[in-house]
Image (cartoon, grey):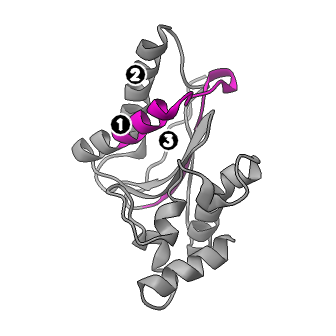
Amino acid sequence: MGRRKRIWVPGTFYHVVCRGNRRDALFKDEGDFKTFLRILQQVHEKTPFELATYCLMTNHYHLQIRSKDQSISKVMSLVNKRYADYYNTKNRITGHVFEKRYYDKPIESKQGMLEVSRYIHLNPVEANMVAHAQSYRWSSYRYYIHTSRHPLLNMAAILDYFSGDEWEKRQKYQDFVG
């Protein structure tokens, strides 16, 4: 029996999750986190996509992502292949880095977009890694509540669901997540 064919709807955001093999750590140190973000940037330059939110946990990651021109499968295969090559080389090992194919689910509503973004940003809090989402370094949440920008993030995809100027939208989003 073959694997199910992934359905891609251009322009639709997806919640993507990928775990380390045997739930082992994907990110063992700061360099691993930084490398993964750099790989996302490199893939974005060659195969553009939009990233609304992200959170890199120790043994898995979450992305709220959409692509208009290339399938999510194409984007994710590039990201995961490059990271697996880096990880295996760095750790002098061979074999699978990821547990299985990534999980993806299309996000089909405004409420879904907001709920997924909140879920992603609260993941480190729920895992008792930090007390507050803004304390977690490897998440996009800090960019949402401060005026700083991230080259990969399309924060308007989330913030535009709220009314007001940019500062008011950021405050409303913080209230929504908190």
* Residue range corresponding to the magenta coloring: 12-40
- Give percent across and percent down for residue 51: 42, 56
Q: Which residue is drawn at 44% across and 50% down?
A: 8
Per the image, label 3 sits on a secondary structure element best described as loop
Identify whether 64 is placed above or below 45.
below
- Give percent across and percent down for residue 26: 56, 28
Per the image, label 2 sits on a secondary structure element best described as helix
Residue type, numbered disc 3: Arg
Q: Does the magenta stretch include residue 156?
A: no
| Mark 3, residue position | 6
- In the picture, measured across the screen, residue 160 lies left or right of residue 172, that is left
Q: Which residue is drawn at 65% across and 76% down?
A: 176
Residue 156 shows in the view = yes
Q: Does the magenta stretch include residue 20?
A: yes
Query: Mark 2 near mark 3, Cβ–Cβ under 8 Å?
Result: no
Identify whether 115 is placed above or below 125.
below
- In the picture, measured across the screen, residue 128 lies left or right of residue 72, that is right
C-alpha separation, residue under disc 1 versus residue under disc 3: 23 Å
The numbered mark at residue 39 is 1
| Mark 2, residue position | 86
Residue type, numbered disc 2: Tyr
Q: Earlier in the sequence, mark 1 or mark 2?
A: 1
Q: Which residue is drawn at 55% across and 36% down?
A: 102
Looking at the picture, tell me which residue is in the foreground, 47 or 58: 58
Q: Which of marks 1 and 3 is nearer the N terminus?
A: 3
Looking at the picture, tell me which residue is in the foreground, 149 or 41: 149
C-alpha separation, residue under disc 2 versus residue under disc 3: 26 Å
Q: Nearer the viewer, mark 2 or mark 3?
A: 2
Looking at the rendering, in which quadrant would you find the C terminus? bottom right
Residue 17 shows in the view = no
Q: Nearer the viewer, mark 1 or mark 3?
A: 1
- In the picture, measured across the screen, residue 106 lies left or right of residue 81, that is right
